[in-house]
């Protein structure tokens, strides 16, 4: 019994350790000035992608439902928090505290959207669920693109047409400008905050998995009928896992939004391309493996940049790496090979302990 | 008063009358068998009792409480647990976690307490582990507690399913063809296990079975279904010698 618990926590600590080690490595490289400015600009998005991959793994790996709308929840979190930060920039001068509140708001709004979308969507299964989540993701992105919001001495003005139809007083200020998005969001996020959020995300997800709730969710994934026969409330736990996943995607959105001076909802950052990319991280890292998601997200984000010098061959190598990772994770031979290696390690450890 | 009282239970699927006028009374502590040829409606009766289907007519009383038409979660909480004809384990979870999933409604702590590892999490998890290991020991599965359920041999998967059903602390246990696909040795072992479960947990058991050796070996009373209707019921030895029953099984 004890053995098992310690095995789980050991696995978690290895994951935390990898993240912290990567953080220290980057800090050392930064202080010695070995990191190009391009790479420096990539650090916060990197944390964003890791959070997204880990949170999507809760839906895909643990709940067992293929969701293609994850970027939509990120979009919701990003815009809600950016709006909040812009409105309270003067009211709350302390950027740390303001960002903390922004994270809470981003997570809460994304969770609410997760519940609203989850209620109809989670009645579906498999491909149908994937397609409907894809559609919802696109709907969110396109809705955000037509929202105009302004503030003047009379309060908030809302329109879905253009800036003129907001009918503001001359002292008014446009907050969301349709397709041009939100400009002037304070740059509150940093790599350090990003790493802390990554750790918190991993903490929440792994602890959730290894709890009563996580067991119920996995039971539903493995056999819905049997789970029902044991008195497990299917709707409740599906919705719970889905909305936790959505709210953490919202947190990633907050991090992302506060790294940019202009936040727009483009197909590139909140469209289905993004959703699919996150799914690629999850699938390549191993469905259900949190550590795998982290590593895959980091490698696949850095790779195109590291290969920039190779110009033409860049995407070719990227594709080869995708295939190689897929084989390494899923082909039976490769798995066998990995198991013998890890088996040797643990056996050696055991004999040492016995001695 | 009987533990389970079913009166006039019936259900149709389209034009097909799957179960008609089904009556059964099971006393506390009894081991009751439900037999019948293929397609007689045995599993449909199980699905009606556990709330997978809602009956068109009739009533089900468990321990004096009306559970007719309730959904399967409520019925499980009321005290009926079941296993399945085709094994339905949580394959990608450990054997221990399978049983702990069965303990879901017996031990409580909130999701927040689970995520932030508050003291109650450790306390309740410890109790759950103890209880689950106790159950696994009864079925001599404690050695395999860390195995993935999918990696267990067939006979042990059947046992694990019974252990998981017992984890929900039921008053009545429904076993759907527990000996299906077992060799004679495994069947013999299963008979011992079922008798042991009955004694150890003072459990009332209703089982569907085709293996007549098992049925005549352990069941006290039988009900025979044919084309969705009760053909005969009574003491095992009497029912098995009933002419109508023999005809239904073997033909004229």
Image: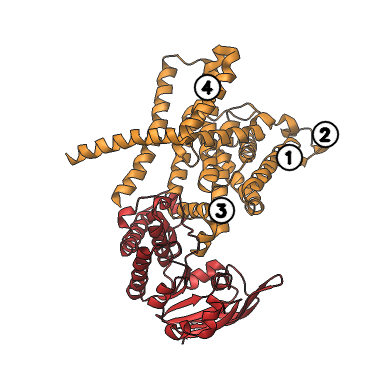
Chain colours: A orange, B red
Mark nearest the camera among 3 and 1 is: 3
Q: Residue at x 29, y 50 (%)?
A: A2
Residue sitting nearer the eye, A321 or A172: A321
Q: Marks 3/2: CA distance? A: 44 Å
Mark nearest the camera among 3 and 2 is: 3
Mark 4 lies on residue: A303
User: Which quadrant of the view contains residue B58?
Assistant: bottom right
Q: Which of disc 4 and disc 1 is earlier in sequence?
A: 1
Q: Give the chain letter at badge 1.
A: A
Label pair 4/3, CB-CB below 8 angstroms = no
Q: Which mark is residue A64?
A: none
Residue sitting nearer the eye, B97 or B177: B177
Q: Pointer 3: residues within 10 angstroms few (<14), some, or many (20+)? A: many
Q: Give the chain letter at badge 4.
A: A
Q: Which of disc 3 and disc 4 is earlier in sequence?
A: 3
Mark 2 lies on residue: A164
Q: Marks 3/1: CA distance? A: 26 Å
Whether residue A264 is visible, yes or no, is: no
Q: Residue at x 44, y 55 (%)?
A: A212
Q: Residue at x 66, y 35 (%)?
A: A272
Q: Pointer 4: residues within 10 angstroms few (<14), some, or many (20+)? A: some
Mark 1 lies on residue: A143
Q: Which of disc 1 and disc 2 is earlier in sequence?
A: 1
Q: Which mark is residue A238?
A: 3
């Amino acid at each position: 019994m004890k053995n098992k618990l310690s095995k789980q926590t050991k696995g978690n600590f290895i994951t935390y350790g990898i993240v912290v080690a990567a953080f220290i490595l980057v800090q050392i490289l930064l202080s010695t000035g070995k990191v190009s400015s391009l790479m420096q600009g990539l650090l916060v998005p990197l944390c964003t992608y890791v959070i997204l991959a880990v949170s999507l793994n809760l839906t895909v790996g643990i709940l067992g439902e293929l969701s293609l709308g994850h970027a939509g929840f990120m979009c919701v979190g990003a815009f809600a928090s950016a709006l909040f930060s812009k409105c309270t920039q003067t009211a709350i001068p302390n950027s740390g505290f303001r960002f903390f509140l922004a994270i809470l708001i981003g997570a809460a709004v994304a969770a609410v959207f997760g519940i609203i979308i989850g209620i109809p969507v989670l009645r579906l299964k498999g491909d149908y669920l994937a397609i409907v989540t894809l559609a919802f993701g696109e709907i969110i992105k396109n809705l955000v693109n037509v929202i105009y919001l302004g503030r003047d001495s009379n309060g908030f003005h809302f329109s879905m047409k253009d800036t003129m139809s907001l009918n503001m007083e001359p002292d008014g200020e446009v907050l969301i400008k349709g397709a041009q998005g939100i400009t002037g969001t304070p740059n509150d996020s940093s790599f350090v905050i990003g790493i802390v959020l990554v750790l918190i995300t991993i903490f929440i997800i792994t602890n959730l998995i290894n709890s009563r709730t996580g067991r119920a969710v996995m039971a539903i994934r493995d056999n819905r009928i049997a789970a029902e026969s044991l008195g497990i409330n299917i709707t409740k736990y599906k919705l719970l896992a889905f909305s936790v996943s959505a709210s953490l995607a919202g947190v990633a959105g907050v991090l992302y939004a506060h790294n940019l001076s202009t936040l727009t909802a483009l197909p590139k950052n909140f469209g289905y391309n993004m959703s699919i990319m996150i799914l690629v991280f999850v699938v390549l890292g191993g469905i259900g493996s949190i550590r795998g998601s982290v590593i895959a997200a980091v490698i696949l984000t850095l790779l195109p940049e590291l290969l920039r010098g190779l110009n033409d061959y860049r995407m070719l190598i990227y594709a080869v790496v995708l295939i190689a990772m897929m084989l390494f994770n899923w082909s039976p031979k490769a798995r066998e090979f990995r198991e013998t290696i890890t088996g040797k390690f643990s056996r050696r450890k055991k004999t040492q302990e016995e001695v | 008063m009987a533990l389970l009282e079913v009166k006039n239970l019936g259900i149709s699927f389209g034009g097909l009358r799957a179960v008609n006028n089904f009556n059964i009374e099971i006393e506390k502590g009894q081991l009751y068998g439900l037999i019948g040829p293929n397609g007689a409606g045995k599993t449909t009766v199980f699905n009606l009792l556990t709330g997978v289907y809602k009956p068109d007519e009739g009533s089900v009383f468990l321990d004096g409480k009306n559970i007719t038409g309730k959904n399967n979660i409520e019925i499980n909480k009321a005290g009926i647990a079941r296993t399945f004809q085709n094994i339905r384990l949580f394959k990608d979870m450990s054997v221990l976690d399978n049983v702990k999933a069965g303990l879901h409604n017996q031990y409580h702590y909130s999701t927040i307490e689970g995520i932030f590892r508050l003291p109650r999490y450790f306390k309740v998890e410890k109790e759950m582990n103890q209880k689950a290991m106790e159950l696994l020991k009864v079925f001599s599965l404690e050695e395999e507690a860390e195995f993935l359920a999918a990696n267990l041999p067939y006979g042990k998967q059947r046992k694990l399913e019974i252990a998981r059903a017992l984890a929900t602390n039921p008053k009545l246990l429904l076993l759907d063809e527990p000996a299906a696909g077992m060799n004679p040795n495994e069947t013999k072992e299963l008979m011992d296990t079922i008798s042991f479960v009955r004694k150890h947990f003072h459990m009332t058991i209703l089982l569907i079975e085709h293996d007549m050796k098992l049925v005549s070996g352990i069941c006290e009373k039988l009900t025979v279904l044919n084309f969705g209707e009760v053909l005969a019921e009574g003491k095992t030895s009497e029912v098995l010698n009933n002419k109508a029953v023999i005809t239904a099984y073997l033909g004229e």
